[in-house]
Amino acid sequence: MNEAMHREEQNQIRRARSNGVVLYADAVALVLLQSRDLVPWEVIRFTGKQLSAAKRVDLSRRLYGRGEREGLVVPPGLSPGPGVVLLPPTQAQKVKDALDESGASYDVFPIWRRAQTHSHRMRKSTRRSSP
C-alpha cells in the first residue's frame, strides 16, 4: 500500500509541474516542485511622487549612481522600467532602506528567478580591427 501511495504522490507532483500554477499546497510538496535552479529575488515598485524634486534627484542618484559613482542597483540587479527594480535579496534590503530614508512609497513582491551562472553577459565586440 505504501508503494502505491508513493506512486500516486509522484503522479500528482508531475501533474502539478505540467499545469504550472500551484494555488495551495503542503510546504513539502512545494519543495519537491521547486526547480533546483531557482533563487529568491524581489521586485520593488516605488514612487517618489510625493517627494520634492530635489529629494527625487537625490534618490535617483543613490539608486542608480551618477557618472563614475555607482548606485545601489548594480548587476545582477536591474531596472526593467521607471519605478521598478528587480533585485537579489542582498541588494533589495539596501534599496528598501534608501527608499525608507527618502520617504518614498514602495511595494515589494517576492519572486523566484532562475539562477544565472554569470552575473553579466559578455558582448562580442563589433569593432573591426585595423589591418
Image: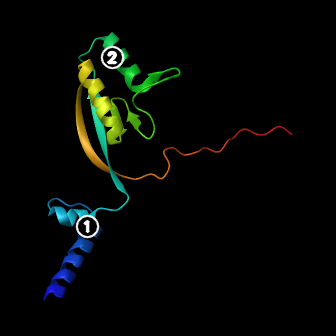
Q: Amino acid at mark 2?
A: Arg
Q: Nearer the viewer, residue 111 or 36?
A: 36
Give residue 92's quadrant in the image.
top left
* Residue 93 in sight from this viewpoint: yes
Q: Earlier in the sequence, mark 1 or mark 2?
A: 1
The answer to whether marks 1 and 2 mark residues whose Cβ atoms lie closer than 8 Å is: no
Q: Quadrant of residue 103?
A: top left
Q: Which residue is mark 1?
A: 32
Residue 36: x, y in percent?
A: 35, 62
Q: Nearer the viewer, residue 62 or 84?
A: 62
> How dense is the environment of label 1, judged by Cα within 10 Å: few (below 14), some, or many (20 and up)?
few
Q: What residue sits 23% from the left and 30% below the top?
A: 106
Which residue is located at x 79 percent, y 39 percent?
129
Instruction: Give the residue displayed 36% in from the left and 29% down from the top.
Output: 82
Residue 49 visible at all:
no
Check disc 2: other Cα within 10 Å, few if <14, some if 14-19, many if 20+: some
- The furthest residue to the right: 131
In this rendered view, identify the residue nearer to me: 131 or 91: 91
Label 1 sits on a secondary structure element that is helix
- Number of the label disc, if any, that sits on residue 56: 2
Total residue callouts: 2
Residue projecting furthest to the bottom: 1
